[in-house]
Image (cartoon, grey):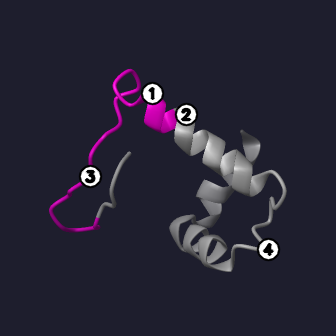
């Protein structure tokens, strides 16, 4: 998904289309691997760690941990 979704309001959310956005998906994965590979706990990226913590509730984090 691209953009952010506001709860209870009109959504400006755009869905990714895998074929159409393949390059963007590959770039995002490579960037995530570049950041998380040497720093899986995001110790060197506190703002990113905090943003992710706000976005993920416990059930989301548990689900992601299983994959």
**Left or right for 58, reference 65:** left
Among the two numbered marks 3 and 2 on one chain, the one whose residue lies closer to the N terminus: 3
Q: Was residue 20 drawn as part of the magenta stretch in this picture? A: yes
Mark 4 element type: loop
- Asked if marks 3 and 1 touch (Cβ < 8 Å), the reply is no
Residue indicated by mark 4: 43
The image quadrant of residue 35 is bottom right
Mark 4 neighbour density, 10 Å: few (under 14) some (14–19) many (20 or more)? few
- Asked if marks 1 and 2 touch (Cβ < 8 Å), the reply is yes
- Real-space Cα distance between discs 1 and 2? 6 Å
* Residue sitting nearer the eye, 60 or 21: 21
Residue indicated by mark 3: 13
Mark 3 element type: loop
Residue indicated by mark 1: 22
- Real-space Cα distance between discs 1 and 4? 30 Å
**Which is in the foreground here, disc 3 or disc 2?**
2
Q: Position of residue 18 (x, y in %)?
A: 41, 26
**Which is in the foreground here, disc 4 or disc 3?**
4
């Amino acid at each position: 998904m691209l953009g952010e979704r506001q709860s209870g309001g009109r959504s400006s959310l755009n869905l990714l289309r895998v074929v159409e956005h393949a390059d963007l998906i590959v770039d995002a994965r490579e960037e995530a691997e570049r950041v998380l590979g040497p720093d899986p706990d995001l110790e060197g990226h506190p703002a990113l760690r905090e943003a992710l913590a706000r976005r993920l509730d416990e059930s989301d984090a548990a689900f992601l941990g299983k994959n």
